[in-house]
Image (cartoon, grey):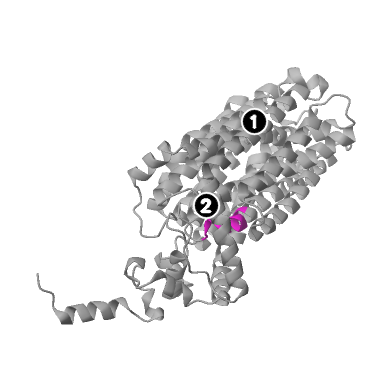
């Protein structure tokens, strides 16, 4: 079939648009991705990413600190007015072993609803879905104050897990549309840094609210749930107003130029999710289920979480039993582990940017450190000072582990549906550790400071080290390539330009 020369000329002219108007077309119609990226300077790149950082980092940090304050308060209120008539165990007529199910039930529900929640993310848009998640869990959290027996508390914890499901994997899946895999350490650092601030803020809140015990006929533990629930509901409105969706969403055009929107998507690797991808792609789900890396990452996380969640759940009880401080100052003993974790997480975020080690190499050191301090917790005849130091550093290494881990995990995801499904599947399987961890600390192990329980936790972390070795083997080529490209991008940035050469291939 003959082709009109004028049509050819017009098509060619339309394909070679000026760089300021090229962003209005799809990436497939751009004449040259490399040429387009090369038209940006390193300063322009920093300016654009500063815009993105301002929209996301503080907000996702606040979302995650709120989530974790609302999650760890079950462990915190357990030791509020401990041994007194208005303690939650006394008022709800529960034993310590029965109370352990409060956390396990929460995670069971979380596991069940994590994947369905995340698969709705693209269709509902992140802003709508995340504000729904936060508002509904705030409502359920406030309802905790009204329970009168253990059955009511169990029901509230189940619905809390249901409502919270999808927050973290939803944020992680969305961020993959804005940040490259080698940059994911920064937003993950902000989330987990704020998460560990939750231990500080939550302890201070519990300490302050402890003085409200009996006010208006409510016990201190009821005030904790009621006030935190009300604040969470109000914060859902902030998320609705502020949280962006995707680079090329209509709302993003209010603070990004078309050229900047195009740049943000073109700078991503081929496997990253894009704005215009369909809400659901069955092929990407099946590909994820067939990928052995999916199960390797899941195994690594579930084993690490089994040990880490066990320590986090029991930490307020352990620090209280050490006898360094009486009521209500016992709550303040939970601050040093959280503070140490925050500082270490900031260091990890800085260290990952340098690309001196691949993510799995870094994780090998973190697993070894966590294992060493968990061993201290399961050894007999250790002083209470050594036990407290082990609690601080054990918590720190466990918390830092997830900064390189989730950045590493994000590098092998593909597409919007694939990222949403895999991250949710990964997260829900990993939370099995949250179901099992609290059950390790039963009353029959309390006589010697839960040495048997901590021995199981230490064994799980040691096994996680081995599982990470397997995962590293499966992803070694991809991780080496990411490190290579990261170093090239760093060098290009020093020279005042943007790296536009061959990118990482999954």
Q: Is residue 130 left or right of residue 67?
A: left
Q: Nearer the viewer, residue 43 or 121?
A: 43
Q: Quadrant of residue 447?
A: top right
Measuring from the top left, give residue 79's x and y in whole percent. 76, 33
Task: Check disc 2 and report its element: helix, strand or loop.
Answer: helix
Q: Residue at x 32, y 70 (%)?
A: 29
Q: Can you tell which of label 2 and label 1 is closer to the viewer?
A: 1
Other-residue count near label 1 (Cα within 10 Å), few / some / many at <14 / 14–19 / ≥20: some
Side of 113 relative to 332 (left or right): left
Would you say 94 lies left or right of 332 here? left
Residue 180 lies in the magenta stretch: yes
Picture coordinates of residue 307 (x, y %)?
68, 32
Residue ID at (74%, 20%) = 443
Q: Which residue is mark 1?
A: 463
10 Å crowding of disc 2: few (<14), some (14-19), many (20+): many
Q: Quadrant of the N terminus?
A: bottom left
Q: Main secondary structure of the magenta part?
A: helix
Residue 170 image point, x, y percent:
49, 49
Residue 188 showing in the rendered view: yes
Q: Which mark is residue 17?
A: none
- Camera sees residue 80: no
Number of numbered discs: 2
Residue 286 falls inside the magenta stretch: no
Which residue was labeled with disc 2? Answer: 171
Q: For this rendering, which residue is in front, 26 or 214?
A: 26
> Does 6 sit left or right of 240 as displayed?
left
Q: Is residue 21 above or below residue 452?
A: below
Q: Secondary structure at mark 1?
A: helix
Callouts 2 and 1 close, C-beta under 8 Å: no
Q: Position of residue 382 (x, y in %)?
A: 88, 29
The magenta span reads: 179-188
């Amino acid at each position: 079939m003959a082709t009109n020369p004028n049509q050819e000329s017009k098509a060619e002219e339309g394909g070679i648009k000026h760089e300021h108007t090229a962003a209005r077309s799809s990436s497939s119609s751009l004449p040259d991705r490399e040429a387009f990226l090369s038209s940006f300077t390193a300063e322009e790149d920093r300016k654009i990413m500063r815009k993105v950082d301002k929209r996301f980092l503080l907000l996702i940090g606040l979302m995650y600190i709120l989530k974790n304050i609302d999650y760890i308060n079950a462990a915190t209120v357990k030791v509020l007015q401990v041994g007194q008539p208005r303690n939650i165990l006394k008022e709800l007529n529960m034993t310590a072993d029965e109370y352990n199910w409060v956390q396990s039930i929460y995670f069971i529900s979380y596991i069940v609803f994590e994947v369905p929640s995340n698969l709705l993310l693209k269709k509902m848009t992140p802003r709508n879905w995340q504000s729904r998640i936060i508002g509904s869990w705030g409502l359920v959290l406030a309802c905790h104050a009204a329970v009168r027996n253990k059955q009511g508390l169990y029901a509230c914890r189940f619905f809390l897990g249901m409502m919270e499901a999808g927050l973290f994997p939803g944020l992680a899946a969305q961020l993959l549309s804005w940040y490259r895999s080698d940059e994911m350490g920064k937003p993950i650092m902000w989330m987990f840094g704020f998460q560990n601030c939750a231990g500080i803020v939550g302890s201070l809140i519990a300490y302050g609210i402890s003085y409200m015990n009996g006010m208006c006929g409510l016990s201190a533990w009821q005030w904790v749930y009621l006030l935190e629930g009300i604040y969470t509901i109000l914060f859902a409105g902030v998320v609705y107003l502020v949280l962006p969706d995707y680079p090329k969403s209509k709302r993003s055009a209010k603070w990004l130029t078309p050229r900047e929107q195009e740049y943000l998507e073109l700078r991503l690797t081929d496997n990253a999710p894009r704005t215009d991808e369909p809400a659901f792609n069955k092929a990407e789900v099946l590909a994820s289920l067939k990928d052995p890396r999916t199960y390797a990452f899941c195994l690594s996380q579930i084993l690490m979480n089994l040990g880490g969640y066990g320590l986090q759940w029991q930490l307020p009880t352990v620090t209280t039993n050490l006898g360094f401080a009486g009521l209500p100052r016992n709550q303040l003993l939970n601050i040093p582990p959280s503070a140490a974790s925050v500082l270490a997480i900031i260091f990890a975020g800085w260290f990952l940017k340098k690309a001196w080690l691949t993510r799995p190499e870094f994780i090998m050191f973190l697993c070894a450190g966590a294992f060493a301090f968990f061993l201290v917790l399961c050894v007999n005849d250790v002083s209470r000072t050594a036990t407290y130091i082990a609690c601080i550093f054990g918590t720190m290494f466990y918390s830092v582990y997830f900064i390189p881990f989730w950045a590493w995990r994000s590098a092998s995801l593909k597409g919007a549906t694939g990222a949403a499904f895999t991250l949710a599947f990964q997260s829900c399987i990993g939370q099995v550790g949250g179901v099992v961890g609290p059950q390790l600390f039963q009353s029959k192990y309390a006589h010697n400071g839960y040495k048997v329980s901590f021995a199981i936790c230490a064994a799980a972390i040691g096994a996680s080290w081995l599982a990470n070795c397997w995962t590293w083997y499966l992803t070694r080529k991809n991780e080496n390539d990411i490190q290579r490209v990261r170093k090239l991008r760093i060098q290009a940035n020093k020279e005042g330009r943007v790296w536009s050469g061959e990118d990482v291939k999954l």
